[in-house]
Image (tube, helix red, strand yellow):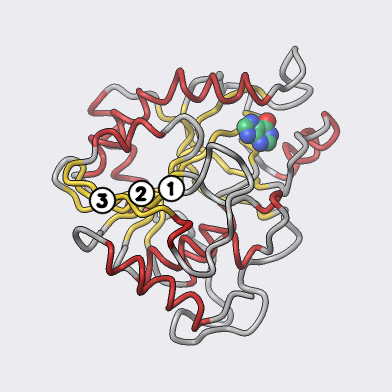
């Protein structure tokens, strides 16, 4: 059970292990681990060292917080996010975001791999998240509200900061980085969608679909963080793709496109 006391205890342990107070938090999605290699003066804190942190269910993908500087900016990276399909409550899925906020993070960058629905998107391209659809049929904010963290009924009319998005677009233009934009729909997974579900999502206004990010963005806004989100389009969505979806291909596509996104994010970091 996640409570104010358990979260604050875990945050206290994390804070004590930080090298320097971070201003920007980054959740690394599939294919983005290259960003971690750019860290200067890094300290690594395995999530298994933090009390009440859910144990990783995927071997070889244990979570780790990395604290240091990229392009002179103090950052806290999370490698190995928690997904709802691991059987966890959404309040557990968003624990790393609460911890980042309690450690001083003011701006959060969420990244993920996603299937593309928008007809102009190609695998390997990156989409700036303009807005989202929460299709988890639940909220990470269900349960008693901790008023010290945020309001009971937080506004969600601008989850992804307009100001930061505008800067992200500007940096993309200046560096010649093709940045698509659109709506990200988050489904619980772990199965990929059916073609009928993809047609439904397209009708609802989704441009990309994945299984993460939205619960994290909701909690980040609850705690008053500014949020930016990027989806690496690793595949065309079910029914649009001419071939069945395969997790290994999704991972490989992420790895192939990752370095370009890493280079772009590095350029963006010093501007936000
Ligand atoms: N659907 C859901 N999640 C995903 C996909 C997809 O097509 N690709 C990568 N993550």
Residue 166 appears at what percent x and percent y?
Answer: 33, 45
Q: Which residue is mark 1?
A: 27
Q: Which residue is mark 3?
A: 43
CA gap, disc 2 and disc 1: 6 Å
Q: Viewed as shown, does residue 157 lie left or right of 271? A: right
Query: Measuring 19% from the left and 44% from the top, which residue is drawn there?
Result: 270
Q: Which residue is mark 2?
A: 77
Tell me the element at label 1.
strand
Ligand 1 placement by image quarter: top right
Tell me the element at label 3.
strand
Look at the picture and state if 82 lies above or below 175: below
CA gap, disc 3 and disc 1: 16 Å
Q: Which quadrant holds the N terminus?
A: bottom right
Label 2 crowd bin: few (<14), some (14–19), many (20+), radius 10 Å: many
Query: Measuring 41% from the left and 56% from the top, which residue is drawn there?
Result: 227
In this view of the protein, which residue sits in the foreground, 153 or 83? 83
Look at the picture and state if 5 lies above or below 68: below
Total numbered badges shown on the rendered structure: 3
Q: Earlier in the sequence, mark 3 or mark 1?
A: 1
Q: Are marks 2 and 1 in contact (CB under 8 Å)?
A: yes
Label 3 crowd bin: few (<14), some (14–19), many (20+), radius 10 Å: some
Residue 165 appears at what percent x and percent y?
Answer: 37, 46
Residue 243 appears at what percent x and percent y?
Answer: 75, 13
Residue 103 appears at what percent x and percent y?
Answer: 32, 68
Q: As drawn, which residue projects farthest toward the left?
A: 72
Q: Are marks 3 and 1 in contact (CB under 8 Å)?
A: no
Q: As drawn, which residue projects farthest toward the right?
A: 196
Query: Measuring 53% from the left and 20% from the top, which residue is drawn there?
Result: 253
């Amino acid at each position: 059970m996640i409570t104010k006391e358990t979260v604050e205890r875990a945050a206290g342990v994390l804070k004590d292990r930080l090298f320097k107070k971070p201003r920007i938090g980054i959740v690394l999605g599939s294919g983005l681990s290259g960003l971690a290699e750019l860290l200067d003066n890094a300290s690594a804190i395995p999530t298994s060292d933090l009390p009440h942190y859910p144990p990783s269910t995927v071997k070889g993908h244990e979570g780790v917080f990395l604290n240091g500087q990229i392009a002179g900016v103090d950052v806290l990276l999370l490698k190995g996010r928690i997904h709802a399909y691991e059987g966890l409550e959404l309040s557990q899925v968003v624990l790393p975001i609460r911890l980042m906020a309690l450690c001083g993070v003011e701006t959060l960058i969420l990244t993920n791999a996603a299937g593309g629905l928008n007809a102009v998107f190609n695998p390997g391209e990156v989409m700036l998240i303009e807005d989202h659809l929460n299709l988890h049929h639940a909220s990470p904010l269900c349960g008693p509200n901790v008023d010290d963290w945020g309001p009971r009924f937080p506004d969600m009319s601008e989850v992804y900061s307009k100001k930061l998005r505008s800067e992200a677009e500007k940096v993309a233009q200046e560096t010649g980085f093709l940045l698509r934009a659109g709506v990200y729909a988050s489904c619980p997974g772990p199965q990929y969608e059916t073609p009928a579900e993809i047609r439904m999502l397209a009708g609802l206004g989704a441009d990309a679909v994945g299984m993460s990010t939205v619960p994290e963005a909701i909690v980040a806004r609850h705690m008053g963080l500014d949020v930016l989100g990027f989806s690496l389009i690793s595949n065309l969505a079910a029914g649009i793709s001419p071939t069945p979806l395969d997790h290994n291909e999704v991972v490989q596509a992420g790895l192939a496109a990752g370095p370009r996104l890493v280079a772009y994010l590095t350029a963006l970091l010093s501007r936000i």
